[in-house]
Amino acid sequence: MAKIKVGVLSGGISLEREVSRLSAENVLQHLDAEKYDIFDIIVNKKAQFFCDNKEIKYLDLGKKIDIVLSVLHGTWGEDGQIQTILDKNNIPYIGSNALGSKQSFSKITTKKILTQNGINTPDYLILNNHHKHKVTLKTVTTKFPQGCVIKIDNSGSSLGIFVCHNEPQILNALAEIERNFSAKDTFFAEQYISGKEYTCGVIDNDAKAEALPIIELVMSKSANFFNFDAKYTGESTKICPAKIKPHLTQNIQKTALNTHKALKLTDFSRTDFIHSNHNELFVLEINSIPCMAKTSLFYQALSVKGIVFSDFLNHLIAKKVS
């Protein structure tokens, strides 16, 4: 019987390309070479595909492999672009389709869909890069006098996020955005909520979605939210399963499942939450392709659930191929 040809896509054009490579390394280590012909396909910063240091054109990709597992994070990986390319070239892939990916990558679109589905998410105010800082400052401080979080709409791994408790911090965030992001980028101010942060993965187990064990994220003193450094450089402690009361566990897992469904995601996702000091649960954002490195939250939750990563990958491939 011929082996299934699996292409693992990683790298990419975004600032998360190194994180993507870490995900790919773990996936490649856990794919069974006796079952699959495995291709490590690296996407460079110009969105060109390479395998064994040779460029592969989109049209030829489908001739080389049977199915794609993309662990491209951020822009061009989780925003529907790569999914659209694969669809146009009739290449099967694991993970959410172009629509689900595009919806979940936009934080503003996510908020609108969550609100339409009765899922709690912090209040927000859309801003534009061409706004004068003084006008923006007044608008934001009037709406969110207790503080805010300024975010870029389309960015992953908590990049382009600024927690602001006073006017100088807001002005600094606006200046940073002006320096480091395009004038075309949409950004917004979100209500600051004080509380504990959690994350919960979801996997599609056959026809039924299932929530993974919840992870509590305990920040170091130098990290005031679960930012890029906290995620990938050890500036946080991850407690899995989270030591919380059963009713909160049930609420978080149910909301993660509802979020996964509302955004039309498939195969896997990971939703970030904050549980406020006033006992309210809010969805902060969702990841349609969570990091799958050995140190990642998603991998940790699978392990605590008792799911062997190689078995999980076998399940994903078998489901798509069949």
Image: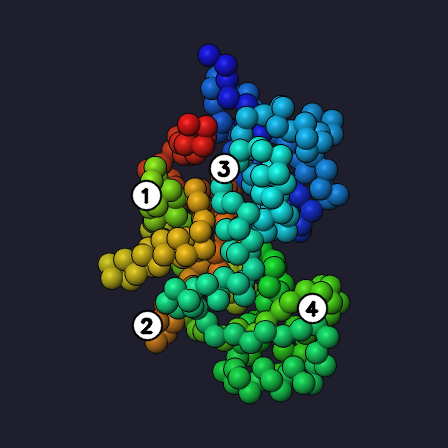
Q: Name which residue lies at 34% across and 76% down.
A: 278
- Dividing the picture into quadrants, the one containing residue 180 is bottom right
Left or right of 207 in this view: 60 = right
Q: In the rendered structure, which disc, 1 or 2, sits on the residue that comes first in sequence?
A: 1
Query: What kind of residue is marked 2?
Result: Asn
Label 1 neighbourhood size at 10 Å, few (<14), some (14-19), many (20+)? few
Q: Position of residue 199 (x, y in %)?
A: 42, 56
Judge whether 77 appears above or below 31 on screen: below
Q: Position of residue 125 (x, y in %)?
A: 55, 76
Q: Name which residue lies at 49% across and 45% down.
A: 96
Front label number (1 vs 2) = 1
Q: Secondary structure at mark 2?
A: loop
Q: Check the picture and name the quadrant holding the C terminus.
A: top left
Q: In the rendered structure, which disc, 2 or 4, sits on the residue that comes first in sequence?
A: 4
Q: Residue furthest left?
A: 246
Judge whether 311 appears above or below 165 on screen: above
Q: Name which residue lies at 47% across and 23% down.
A: 32
Q: Which residue is mark 4?
A: 177
Q: Which residue is mark 3?
A: 94
